Amino acid sequence: MVTVSTADMAAARERRAARRLAFAGRQAVLSLTLNIPGPIKDSPLLRRVFLEAEQQVAALSPVMGQRFEEATGWEGVYCFDRPAAEIKEEAMLIETYHPLGRLFDLDVFDEKGGKLSRPLFRQCFLCGRQAQLCARSRAHPIETLVAKVEQIAISFFLEKDVEQLGALAEESLLYEVSVTPKPGLVDRSNNGAHQDMDLWCFLKSASALRAFFTRCAKAGAQPGSPELLFNRLRQEGRLAEQAMLEATGGVNTHKGAIFSLGLLCGAAGRQLASGAAPKDTLRALSPFFLLPERLAEGGFGSTLYKTGRCGGIRQEAAAGFPSVEAVLPLFQKALADGFSENDAGVLALLHLMARTEDSCLVHRSDIQTAAALRAQVRQALPLLVGPEETVAFAEELDRQLIAQNLSPGGSADLLAVLYFKRRADAAALNGCIGEYPSG
């Protein structure tokens, strides 16, 4: 980051004035800058603030615009074929009502280059008095103002990011159930080996769980020990199961996904609060707080896990979901090789079935039958060189598993984890979920 001087800022104002001339004659020109105290005007956090402001300006439908990424702070100039007074009124609404609006500086100029004034003065960050008076009298230390700006911005983006993590978790469940054909599982074609649930049941459940995943991410962002976070997530998991059962009329559609995605949302929230975008591997996310002895609590799968007979989803979680790490590159390669999103999902599911010990299969049969199915799928994978072969094999396996009343639900949960990781990584890479510290 660069420390800028008073002379640097004066030169930046001159450049802005010259840039506005390129839009001379338009009904309205809007200049976007940030209202940031202190000598540092450009940082990852401040760029996110600018992009949020730019998104608000884009909603005003400018006919033309340009962004300038300067060390003195990012700037934007946008022109409109609407009256300047109208644009000024809408810009003031943004400054007044957006949670970050106090950090936005939206100046509007008419077709003659005249700047439209505000009818009301803006308030100080700290005391609420007229900002200009506080600035002239240097009523507050710069360090205090800078800290307040960071607090405002970090609070806003943390809330926004945990909401997005919840949305990504819901989306991953919708993607998983939509992949067709999925052997023995509910999909768009049939109900697999299930008599008590269908596609609509899964859609209702996924929608009901979004708020739970958001709360898990928010819990992860709160201070506390790994043990405390784990206990918070367990309580959220109980509430999520209640919400699921209410939405589905008592059907267990997503208990395994509640476990996996709830833990991952909590871990991602913890990373956000530490100042890092959740773009690292699942191996870095999950074991940060997962306690293997706690994972052994509750249910049929926990009994298998404790005795070492079948690791299931608990073993995957305790190790940081290594099967998802291994299969995701194969999913990405399938897309690059021309597989559709759906068919790449089918192939990914088959690879997960071949790699993982699925306690759902064991629950419906036994360890030997589950192992034989893994071997069957593993033997077929080298022959699945294209989408046609992949789908044909999955359809045949679907008929086999329906006849045997078998459902690889654990592998389906891992497919949802794969979608979550893929989308969370992409969101972090694209700056949709970002790093907060300016230092």
Image (spheres, helix red, strand yellow):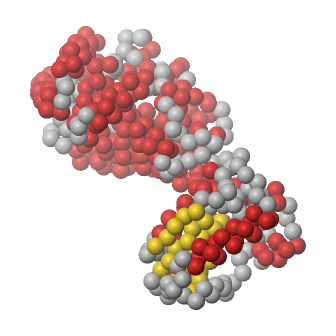
- Residue 90 visible in the picture: no
Q: Is residue 258 left or right of residue 121?
A: left
The relative height of residue 380 versus residue 145 in the rendered view (above or below) is above
Q: Nearer the viewer, residue 2 or 283?
A: 2
Q: Is residue 82 left or right of residue 33?
A: left
Q: Is residue 69 left or right of residue 299?
A: right
Q: Is residue 282 left or right of residue 37?
A: left
Q: Residue 34 at x, y = what percent?
A: 65, 66
Q: Residue 385 at x, y = what percent?
A: 19, 26
Q: Nearer the viewer, residue 369 or 352?
A: 352
Q: Nearer the viewer, residue 31 or 294?
A: 31
Tag count:
0
The relative height of residue 69 versus residue 231 in the rendered view (above or below) is below
- Residue 304 visible in the picture: yes
Residue at image point 28% right, 19% down: 354
The relative height of residue 102 versus residue 392 in the rendered view (above or below) is below
Q: Residue 72 at x, y = what percent?
A: 69, 60
Residue at image point 51% right, 86% down: 25
**Occupied quadrant, residue 148:** bottom right
Residue at image point 21% right, 14% down: 379
Q: Residue 117 at x, y = what percent?
A: 66, 85
**Occupied quadrant, residue 225:** top right
The relative height of residue 115 versus residue 433 in the rendered view (above or below) is below
Residue at image point 69% right, 67% down: 12
